[in-house]
Image (cartoon, rainbow, N blue to C red):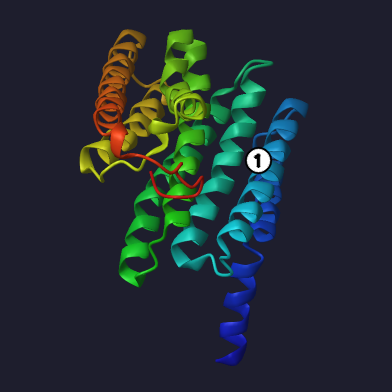
Amino acid sequence: MTVSVQTRTDLSVHGPTVGFAGQLGVLGALAATVGLGPAGWLAGLAYGVVAWLTLSYALHRTGTRSLGAANIVTLARGTLGGGVTALVADSLVGPTPDVVVVTLVAVTAVALALDFVDGLVARRTGSTSALGARFDMETDAFLILVLSVFVAQSLGAWVLAIGAVRYAFVAAGWLLPWLTAPLPPKMSRKTVAATQGIVLLVASAGVLPVALDALLVGLSLTVLAWSFTRDVWWLWRHRPAWVAPAARWSAP
């Protein structure tokens, strides 16, 4: 029992390092099966290094020594996102064989499925935290950004707006501090975010006519724009009550 507890603690304390090792494993598996070019390796490694440094900083800043079971699931989801990033990077510099598309869709599907698992684990184990919520959100946001880059190659650059809107919102918060205030929890916001990933996954698979893919992605972007507009309006109306800047690792 002592060995088991110690092993779990070590995994939590060294989570970012374990995550980077897992990222190398995912990239190696992709290279051995479908192949990765220089662009894929560079993007995948850059993703892994940035994720390692960012998570290490977040753990240090919040004084967190244990990732917890839910965050370990999110970490696994993030490593899969690094694999998707590598595949998309390769698609930008050369033709994308069908086997690569199938692999990209499969890896993305697992990553999206795990998005439901980490929240469930957090609630079941009573390990919800501001760090976990932010970690989950940023992992989702980057995966959606990468998927939008892939789908934009077939539907047009306008699809990039789906992945960019989250980062535009964050950037605006540096200029307008009232945008960094915490938002009230809303299930509709979570539903809209989840829908983006599913719609982009379907469009990435290329199993539907291009016109139908464009329609679905366009509707998804419209709903996303409505969600952000509603949140910005709420923050604007409540800005007089907002004084202190939000912590960068607090829940949205």
Three-letter code, disc 1: Leu
Q: Residue at x 24, y 26 (%)?
A: 230
Name of the residue lying farthest toward the right: 38
Classify the position of the C terminus by image quarter.
Answer: top left
Q: Position of residue 238 (x, y in %)?
A: 26, 34
Indicate left or right for 121 with 248 as reference.
left
The answer to whether residue 70 is above or below residue 190 is below
Viewer-proximal residue among 203 and 167 = 167
Q: Position of residue 83 (x, y in %)?
A: 60, 39
Q: Residues within 10 Å of mark 1 (few under 14, many from 20)?
A: many
Viewer-proximal residue among 233 and 26 = 233
Q: Secondary structure at mark 1?
A: helix
Q: Residue at x 68, y 44 (%)?
A: 48
Name of the residue lying farthest toward the bottom: 1
Classify the position of the N terminus by image quarter.
Answer: bottom right
User: Residue 85 appears in which quarter of the rendering?
Assistant: top right
Q: Position of residue 128 (x, y in %)?
A: 38, 62
The answer to whether residue 213 is above or below residue 2 is above
Residue linked to disc 1: 30
Q: Position of residue 189 (x, y in %)?
A: 27, 37
Give the mark count. 1
The answer to whether residue 5 is above or below residue 180 is below
